[in-house]
Image (tube, rainbow, N blue to C red):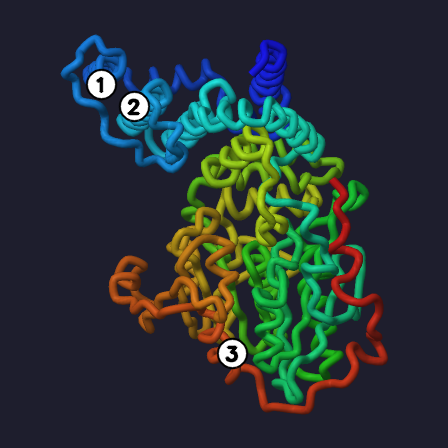
Amino acid sequence: MTDATQKSLADAYGELNRMLLGDAAAKLGSAGTLPDASEMMKTFAAGFAADGGRWLELSNDYYRKQLELWQAYSGTAPDAPKPAPLQDRRFGATEWQEPYFAYLAHSYLLSARWLDELTAATKLEGQAKQKLQFYTRQMIDAMSPANFPWTNPEAIKLAAATEGESINRGLKNLAADIEKGLVSMTDHAAFEVGRNLAITPGAVVYENAFMQLLQYQPLTETVHQRPLVIVPPCINKYYILDLQPDNSFVRHALASGHTVFMVSWRNMPPEMGQATWDDYLEHGVLRALEIAQKICAVPQVNALGFCVGGTLLACALAVLRARGENPVASVTFLTTMLDFSDTGELSIFVDDAYVATREAEFAKGGVLRGRELARTFASLRANDLIWPYVVNNYLKGNTPPPFDLLYWNSDSTNLPGAMYAYYVRNTYLENNLRTPGKLTMCGMPVDLGRIDMPAYVLAAREDHIVPWRTAYATNRLLGGTTQFVLAASGHIAGVINPPERKKRNYWLNADSDAEAETWISGAASQAGSWWPHWTDWLAPQSGPQIPARSTLGSTAFPAGEPAPGRYVRDKSA
């Protein structure tokens, strides 16, 4: 490599390092997840004030191990045994076995373990300790030597082999991501909604300022009399349930003989910032249920809600039952929280100060940007959803491979500020929804116990957004019979598991009245996808078979623009 190339490479590395640690970290959200250093030290000090001996014990052990590590790699103690081979996947490449880089990785892992032990040993309780542990983990993950150009041997080797071209590509990738405000996790050029995502045929049969209602073309000659109305989460686009033909939940429901309607939430513009939770119920969920009833000319429909879409659906059903109405024959909740007693790591973001700040911020309107929530969710799994892409995209200059689920993950929607502030106060902060009559929605007292139709409740065992034990608590809130199912994997992959792929498993136990730990200890594992189990459960709730409708919509609600509609295509920041 020529001197000029080396200088060019050094300059490129310096620029990349500056951007990673400066503007990029702030704009892409990594810095935003880290606490002020002085506050961290105060928390550490408070936690160890009553137990200085433990602090000293852990620190002495850490320094001893670091000294032994240095002796093993520096040659100052030739007989010192080398550490065991690195098992961490971040350091799995052969380049990390070179002595200098192996030392860096082992030293980092010792420091990470030490910080974990220190935070675990602090005499803090509840949310204070959760925050300290979370932020410490964020700092540990961010400081991995794999994340920096001068300490990642794979990136250095690639830069030398390409004479700096990999760094030039990385800088371009980084600049593009700064402009978008998110770390790219997939090749965005590989996907387009309406071209190879959300392509199940259908039409918009109704729209208002909050949502478009899609009706899909049937795939069978006969269908169940009662249609299925799906309420997806309003913080992302609906097509997580209609990705591609081979992993579309919508297509599976259609192939099982159901008429399917889908709510497509609007990506809210600033002028809709004063819209409320009640507006989402009245003009969203309740309106969708009513129109599906009218189009299909049936007294009852089946309904399904996913994540916060399930929370909205439950509130709407409670409002209907308080009004003395019963238009829903069965309900399905997918990874949904109704009891917010344990919200997992998300609870560290929501306290009195946070909610009060957001209420003041949105008092006169405004929207919560979808990318803000996307960064928050990504920070919960930074070593899966942030740092591998930093290394691949910026340090190595690669384009991430196409992955439909991760494309959807970055295609978020804005929420009205007023609606969001109400939601976080009454769920995450105060957990009011579970208390009968504590909340009034659409003029009616809300009591989840009045939701007395059969319910299918699905949780995911590794869900970091809706812990499965929290979802399990839904069984005791509802007034009807429940079928609880626990899927393998996480919040999204546990739900999107088409049977044809023959992947993962799920657990069943008929005793949904038992405590969660008793339920899981007695549950039987079932191979493959839960989707066929759900369709078997739903069929008896769906009425007799009738000829499939030849046209979509009705005279009162004629079919308009073809699915997926324009609301889902709106990418307004």
User: As shown in the figure, which amino acid type bears the numbered disc 3?
Assistant: Leu
222 to 528, vertically: above or below: below
Mark 2 secondary-structure assignment:
helix
Task: Relative to 319, say whether 573 is above or below.
Answer: above
Quick check: can you spot residue 111?
A: no
Residue 340's x, y, as percent? 46, 49
Q: Residues within 10 Å of mark 2 (few under 14, many from 20)?
A: some
Given the image, on which type of amino acid does mark 1 rest?
A: Lys
Which three-letter amino acid code belongs to the residue tagged 2?
Answer: Leu
The label number, if any, that marks residue 538 in the structure image: 3
- Judging depth in this view, the residue of 319 and 7 nearest the camera is 7
Q: Give SS at disc 1.
A: helix
Whole-percent x and y of residue 297? 72, 84
CB within 8 Å, label 1 to label 2: yes
- Report x, y in % for residue 487: 41, 62
Disc 3 vs disc 1: which is toward the camera? 1
**Number of callouts:** 3
Q: Which residue is mark 1?
A: 65
- Marked residue nearer the N-terminal end (3 or 1): 1
| Residue wearing tag 2 | 110
**Front one among 13 and 25:** 13
Q: Is residue 391 visible to the viewer in this orientation of the structure?
A: yes
**At numbered mark 3, what does the secondary structure look like: helix, strand or loop?**
helix
For image coordinates 46% across by 66% down, the residue present is 457
